[in-house]
Amino acid sequence: MKLFRKSPWIIHYDGASCNGCDIEVLACLTPRYDVERLGIINTGNPKHADILLITGYINEQSQPVVRTIYEQMPDPKVVVAVGICASSGGIFRDCYNTKGGVDSTIPVDVYVPGCAARPESIIDGVVQALDILERKRAEMKARRRAKAPAPVTAPAAEVAPS
Amino acid sequence: MNLTHRILAGFLFIALAPILAGLLAGLDRIVSARMQGRIGPPLLQPFYDLFKLFQKERIAVNRSGHFFLLGYLLFTIIAGVEFFTGGDLLITIFALALASVFFVLGAFAAGSPYSHIGAERELIQIMASEPMLLMVAMGFYVATGSFQIGAIYAQPTPLIATLPGMFLGLIYILTIKLRKSPFDLSTSHHAHQEIVKGITTEFAGPYLAIIELAHWYETVLLLGLLYLFFAPWPLLAIAALIVVYFLEILADNTNARLYWQWVLRASWTFTAIVGAGNLIILHYINRGGTP
Amino acid sequence: MHLPLFLIFFPLALAGLLAVVGGSATARSALAKIGSGVVAAGALALYWTTLHRDAQFFALNESGLSPAILGVEILVTIVMLTIALRGRQVLITLLVLAQAALMGMVEFGGHAHPRVAAPLFVDSFSVIMALIIGVVGGLIVWHAVGYMPHYHHHESAVADRQRSFFASIFLFLGAMFALVFANHLGWLFLAWEVTTLCSYLLIGYSRTPEAVRNAFLALRLNLIGGVAFAGAILYLVRTGGSLALNEIIASGQGAVLIPVALICFAGLTKAAQMPFSSWLLGAMVAPSPVSALLHSSTMVKAGVYVFVRFAPILQNTTVGFIFALVGATTFLFASCIAISQSNAKRVLAYSTIANLGLIVTCASVGNAQAVWAAILLIIFHAVAKALLFLAVGSAEHSIGSRDIEDMEGLISRRPKTALAILIGIAGMFLAPFGMLVSKWAAIEALMKSNPLLPVAVAFGSSATLFFWSKWMGKILSTVKGPPPSHGPVSMQEKNAMFFLSALTVGLCAIWPYISSASVKPFLIAHYGTFVEFNRATILIMSIMLALIAALPLSLLYKGDDKLRITTPYLGGANVLERDLFTPSIGLTKPVAIRNYYLTEFFGERRLSRVGYGASLALLVVLTVVVST
């Protein structure tokens, strides 16, 4: 049974965003979108989460935090960059303090473009992440069977259609 | 009950309690969602979550945490088995307290500020609810002359008639035990958590699953305790359980979390009044009957 | 007959010897070691020789001995008077004089001095007490041999008076044995006064102003009880009653209720019940072995000893019920106050007061099951609390503090001492361990009296769960604390802690045996009934104990290569090291975790006032009840 598809728990982190995308992320929890239908829970704790949902670009301040949070998540885990800032740095790309999109710091699996990203596309991005989650789970299982060490880098990123 | 029945009851509890509590949790989430104008997850969602957690990578902040969680699960099950095999109610309560202490120690041992706060708050919750559990046992003793659950279960008249205060008090602390608002200080099942995930913060994957499983066993045990009040009339008992659980969900969805001061003060005051009051009245009635 | 006399006089002789040659460290430690071994062996021998035998009464030539007893009594009075006068303690002087006047009226008041044919006796309860005094006391003395040099190493300002220390300890042990073997109430009273005196000497050991003040406080409060005790003896003599313990107990409730109430009042002061509990807290200035020996496992038990002795008299009386309420009040309030304390010894002191309260409650209710619970509480409490005091004392020397907050991560810093503390704490409140067995019986027994009592026990127990758990949590917490400390822990300290830990755990396995071998005969003799334990309950308790013992084995499981160790969650703001984080303005700060003390609810001053007020009111009611 593909359990990860049915029970994706999310931690939502705001790298450095204008809060536009954050509001859209939270909108997904409202009765109109009700992501709990898909078993999605917003945990607020990396140790319980399967999916790291990041809004906003990465800067000096947020970079170590994003790294720590990613490190503290148990495998299998996927990263979804929500909004154009998280995907590439957006309009802040050339600012003095900007490191770039989320992939400047940790491997990203799904990019959800938009400014702000619409709840529909956020949900779509998460659903796409679920397949990757299942694949990573399968790889983890195979690795464990083969007793191989975990790969250093994550698999290639995929892009959600806008 | 003879020995075979007892052993059978014990095994049935171990096998069926998680299924029952899991379904209840699924129902809980659906009803909660409906109360909030949402559709909510599938009924089997708690099982999906549990099995998923078991498949996750094992991470921990130290190598001893799982030891305490093992104790938590083990002694919750022992408390349940003691209860459903018709054993001693006080031992059941003590075993449950022992299990909770294991859980709390696991969180303390993690040495993280969030789980530490959760552990302290969990202790406050235990302190708030423990007297009522003991008083329920005392109430059963005054009414039936025994702490043996077998004897309490076999009463011909429902105990709710003589122990209404105990029942009210038990419902009150059930909110604490089920981790429902307004008493979900240490952790809750909801997304809103200003102290991250409280006592469970440092437990991930399979360890979190163990905690959830133990919580399910505990839930069934507590519902069993409620059942005892109506034991001779099973249909009424089940109806009462449904109503009580519905009220818990309603309270959960209509209340904000309280300060710990409020939780402690309110629980001790309320349970002292209804619990001790019921005991004393019953004591003097019994005395009047047989001087 | 020889063994009880030996147990009384051997420590006394040793005390004398120590007072003479105790100046040399080698002689002192050798004598103390031999002494502790001999009293423990003597107590065990007494146990073997009296097993399955009825109470034995030893007829002595009392009239021949009474001048000697009188001489000692006068000596004790003179010593106390000297202490009071030199300390300019008006109240103590008055109390000593009052006591002397009362006893003078007994001796020379023109009443026919009642003869006690058998002034000494041994029954299964005194054997239990003797075992506690001999074995637990012996282990504590053994610990002290290693502990005291370290004590003086740490407290360099305190004058080294170890000679008088060990002499007082052995004097105390002798008096304590005399107290539990005495059938003559006058002799019991003499032993009682000697223990009070020893307590005074040992609390004031360091001679700091605080210690001196607290020593006088202890003396003052205990002397109030002493005056009541003397009053009881005078009452018995004047009314032509007997002074033999067994005859008083056999004489039925109506005749002796007043003297029994007076003696039990004395028991309240000795067992540090509210409103007299303050002296036990003050007594914590004494070195840890003293706290372990006098102020938790033996001397304060003398207070509850008289309650258990007189339980058949107190049973179903208003007087007994009021005493039970005093005990329940003390249990509830002392347990709650302990939550607000961070000083480990004060927590232990409050817990001791609370548990003595529970014993007083059980004994005052006085039915067979309650007395059973009381006796088992005495046993379990003596062992676990002695262990805790000794372990906290040793921990204090190795980490330089007795504050619970400073014990953070003790499990990795001093694993063995930490384990001893954990076992002791578990023994105090966790399920399959001893105290819970007796608490279980206590709740059922108290239900038969009045539901108010077990309700107080329920609330009090919940409070104990809180403060013990958070202490355990502190010890287990793995925040990277200060580097491992290497303060020395002597061989003797290790031995004593090891044996007491083993005893704490072992008792949980063998209590059904103790119950049937030693407690049952006592109950049969006084009540004719004995409530057998449900076998299924014993079974489930044993299973739980076995599981707890087996659980640590799971730590040996080394297949943990799949386990990834990560940092604790700190909002993602961890800095490389696990115990550092970056707060809002970009500094680096260490994580600091503190326990909850809930002073808003369980503040010492506030609750003490309420507790003292309630218990004082109860004592006023008691006075009214007794005098009408």
Image (cartoon, coloured by chain):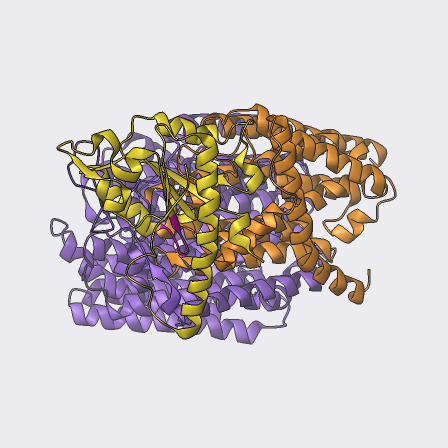
Query: What letter labels the chain drawn in purple?
Result: C
Magenta stretch encompasses residue A135: no
C162 to A64, vertically: above or below: below
Frontmost residue, C501 versus C155 = C501
In this view of the protein, which residue sits in the foreground, B138 or A111? A111
- Quadrant of the drawing holding the C terminus of chain A: top left
C269 lies left or right of C531: left
Q: Is residue C199 left or right of residue B266?
A: left
Residues C456 and C94: in front is: C456
- Look at the picture and state if A161 lies above or below C607: below
* Residue C515 sits above or below residue B253 on the image: below
Chain in yellow in the render? A
Looking at the rendering, in which quadrant would you find the N terminus of chain A?
bottom right
Q: Position of residue C254 (x, y in %)?
A: 69, 39
Shade representing chain B: orange
Please say whether residue B94 is visible from this viewpoint: no
Say whether residue A23 is visible: yes
Q: Is residue A74 magenta?
A: yes
Magenta stretch bounds = A73-78
